[in-house]
Amino acid sequence: MAGERAASWQSIRDTIMLRIRDRTYPPGELIPNEADIAAEFGCARATVNRALRDLAEEGFLDRRRKAGTRVIEAPQRKATLEIPQIRREVEARGQVYGYRLLARATGPAPEEVRARLKLPEAEATLYLESLHLADGEAHMFERRWVVLRTVPGIASADLAAVSPNEWLVREAPYTHGGIACHAEPAGQAAAAALGCAPADPVLVMERQTWLHEAPITYVREHFAQSYRLCLGL
């Protein structure tokens, strides 16, 4: 392959993925070792290692030291946390997005929130209540706590003009987090915002994000009873 440009790790990954899908590399079987793949593609072993590591992280390969690399028999892609922008979600459904900031205050978070974010009792947070609209109707009521130590810029942000959801997605990068969904009675605050009875069940989505060891935010999103959660595979 003299004079040719060495293959990138992405192109090697894609080629190996094709071989997994067409059963050139059958489920449960060993694939060639890094040295052989590097020789085939005319690249460094480090490039091959990067490609195989990516496929292992995606759930397609099982890599074991001294035992080689095998194709996983029942590949499962690992879930990743992607923070949705409510505006885009509403507009993708062909509806007109709207937003209202209902409440804003600074102070310590409740005990439950402090426990989730591992905050000391006196840690300053920005508390926000927001209502997101779709075609003028209530779509989602949001209660959020933002850790000012981690995201000091939000203290001066005009959150009446841009939602905390949009501001944080744009301005506060995160490294990891968690999300949970469940149904529960709306409660007084969410019921008043969504136009339902406090005892009516609604979908609640809880999310927390971190920047390495620093907590960013914890949010509880209460969706209108007409909301449908649709996920892609």
Image (spheres, rainbow, N blue to C red):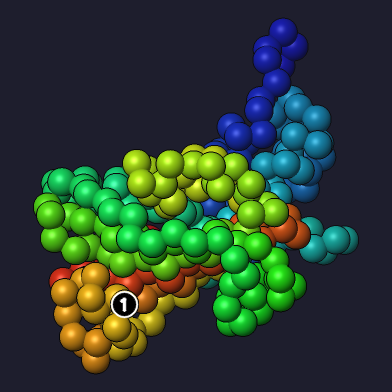
Q: Position of residue 187 (x, y in %)?
A: 31, 85
Mark 1 highlights which residue? 189
Taking the view exactly as shown, the residue that stands out farthest to the bottom is: 199
| Quarter of the image where the N terminus is located | top right
Q: Is residue 188 visible?
A: yes
Residue at the location (70% across, 54% down)? 149
The amino acid on which the numbered mark 1 sits, given as a three-letter code, is Ala
Residue at the location (72% across, 8% down)? 3
Q: Position of residue 109 (x, y in %)?
A: 59, 72
**64 or 178, nearer to the observer:** 178
Left or right: where 113 falls relative to 88: right
Residue at the location (28% across, 65% down)? 140
On screen, residue 120 above or below 39: below
Taking the view exactly as shown, the residue that stands out farthest to the top is: 3
**55 or 98, nearer to the observer:** 98
| Quarter of the image where the C terminus is located | bottom left
Residue at the location (66% across, 79% down)? 115
Q: Is residue 31 visible?
A: no
For label 1, the SS is helix
On screen, residue 122 above or below 63: below
Left or right: where 45 falls relative to 140: right
On screen, residue 28 above or below 17: below
Q: Position of residue 113 (x, y in %)?
A: 58, 75
Taking the view exactly as shown, the residue that stands out farthest to the right is: 66
